[in-house]
Image (tube, rainbow, N blue to C red):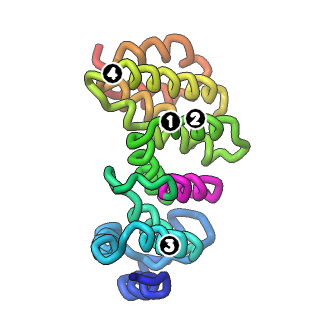
Amino acid sequence: MTTTKQAIAALREAGDPAKAAEMHKYHKVDRPYLGIANPAIDALVKEWRAEDDLDARLTLARGLWKSNIHEGRIAAAKLLSQARIRPDDQAAWELIASWVPDFDAWAIADHVSIAGQKRLVADPTRLDQVAEWTTSDHMWTRRAALVMTLPWTKQNNPKSADLAIRDRVLGWAAGYVTDHDWFIQKAIGWWLRELSKHDADRVRAFLERHSADMKPFAVKEAQRKLTS
């Protein structure tokens, strides 16, 4: 079993102080940075996954998250970013969801959201919990509701249940259009852009109803993949 102490030591060994300073400046959030590129984190996480069972990975992920180290939190998310976790333990989803209120930067939020996407696809009933996030006072929690549901933009031939989820999330996005926080508007545009590749009519209908309330850059992002 890989301990948190061992994992952080391995991350530190792979770090680059000069790159760490650049990352701190770029991400603009005051936490420790080690200066590790994603491929190096991926390689370490692959080793830890191979060595540890699910319970051990959950324990390691908790410890890495609590470290507050940028790369530690990225690695925590990557430990749980599997399409199939057998058994699909509710504990994995609960741990991912417990991290959402801690979000304060896009890179960590997006890596955790990728892990969350896998667990939502595995059990869409978890969307009822995500629905509660849409009224949160925490901007990153509201944003996570869109980023974690991106898989429902991607089906070419969705089943009726998936179409219902697609419309449900579009309803959440509609509730966000007057929120002009940059990250919220970017998430709306991102969701619509991805959906436009597979369901252009729904995107056009959404924009016809709501584009006047959206920031111009978000409308432009939503339209980027639309064909005339």
Quarter of the image for the N terminus: give it: bottom left
Residue found at x 65% / y 37%: 132
- Sooner in the amino-acid sequence: mark 2 or mark 3: 3
Q: Residues within 10 Å of mark 2 (few under 14, many from 20)?
A: few
Q: Say which amino acid is labelled 4.
A: Lys
Please give the residue where the numbered disc 1 appears in the rendered image. Answer: 125
Q: Say which amino acid is labelled 3.
A: Thr
Element at badge 4? Answer: loop
- Sooner in the amino-acid sequence: mark 4 or mark 2: 2
In magenta, the rendered stretch is 92-107
Please give the residue where the numbered disc 2 appears in the rendered image. Answer: 128
Q: Residues within 10 Å of mark 3 (few under 14, many from 20)?
A: some
- Mark yes or no: residue 108 visible: yes
In this view, the residue in front, 45 or 189, is 45
Tags 2 and 3 in contact by the CB under 8 Å rule?
no
Count of numbered circles in the view: 4
Residue 20 percent across, percent down from the top left: 46, 77
Eyeballing the image, is 22 above or below 206?
below
Identify the mark at residue 159; answer none if there is no mark: 4
Eyeballing the image, is 83 above or below 108?
above
Tags 1 and 3 in contact by the CB under 8 Å rule?
no
Q: Say which amino acid is labelled 2.
A: Asp
CA–CA distance in space, label 2 to label 3: 26 Å
- Mark yes or no: residue 186 visible: no
- Numbered disc in front, either 4 or 1: 1
CA–CA distance in space, label 1 to label 2: 6 Å
